[in-house]
Image (tube, rainbow, N blue to C red):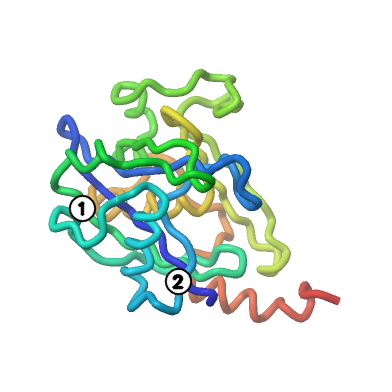
Amino acid sequence: TRLAAVLVLLFEQDGQLRVLLTTRAKELRTHGGQTSLPGGKMEDADGDIVVTACREANEEVSLPLDSPHVHILGTLELNPFHALIVTPVVALLTDNSILDVLRAGKGEVDHIFSHPLEAILEPNLAPSLETLVAHGSEYWPYESKHHHHVDYVVKALGGMTYRLHCYQTSASPITGMTADILIRAAEIAYHKQPQFERYAFDQLRTYEAIVKAYEANRVAYGPK
């Protein structure tokens, strides 16, 4: 299947809404050592995409299945990710004692951590709420503090520019699709826009526009 899901698990701690994140195991063949939301490909036995997100979270971080304290709030816009179509499933955890029983899945996850959601929109909030990794360290080699972006030209989308956002955290940086999903979740939660320029000047902003551009360019940029 090309369908996949990630779980955006939110919880309140010390008056702040936070999101659960993982650092993928370094030995993984793809995206090892990177920050991720719990998730993965849909399986035939999954009844729907919400089941996929919850099952993957159970496998990766031992989040209990069918917990009365995990409330599904809905889904966000589809996100293309390589050959996958990823649905972000947003949930609210209302019993923080469950966080104490989470365990990193061996071979899949190296570390479980969280980040304040509002700091996704206002990165300068992060150091007052977190002990961030050291500036200039392996996990934050950038000159800028708290937030960084890089613009890439995507030939397969007709030369469109994609802005990749990076966030300094207490562990591995939040980047790429994970950053994109959290920006959208934070915009909805806080009813405000990021304090930085979200998109590159010519960036496609919807899943439908990206698919249309890809289809239009697939002959020119596909396998020869």
Return the x and y of residue 31 as percentages of the image width and height: 60, 48
The residue located at (67%, 80%) in the rendering is 216
Q: Is residue 165 visible?
A: no
Q: Residues within 10 Å of mark 1 (few under 14, many from 20)?
A: some
Q: Nearer the viewer, residue 201 or 139?
A: 139
Return the x and y of residue 54 as percentages of the image width and height: 32, 61
Label 2 element class: loop
Distance Cα–Cα, label 2 vs label 1: 21 Å
Residue placed under numbered mark 1 in the picture? 92
Compared across the picture, whether 65 is left or right of 203 comes to left
Sequence-first disc among 2 and 1: 2
Q: Residues within 10 Å of mark 2 (few under 14, many from 20)?
A: many
Q: Nearer the viewer, residue 74 or 161?
A: 74
Residue placed under numbered mark 2 in the picture? 42
The residue located at (64%, 80%) in the rendering is 215
Amino acid type indicated by mark 2:
Met
Residue situated furthest right in the rendering = 224
Return the x and y of residue 167 as percentages of the image width and height: 47, 36
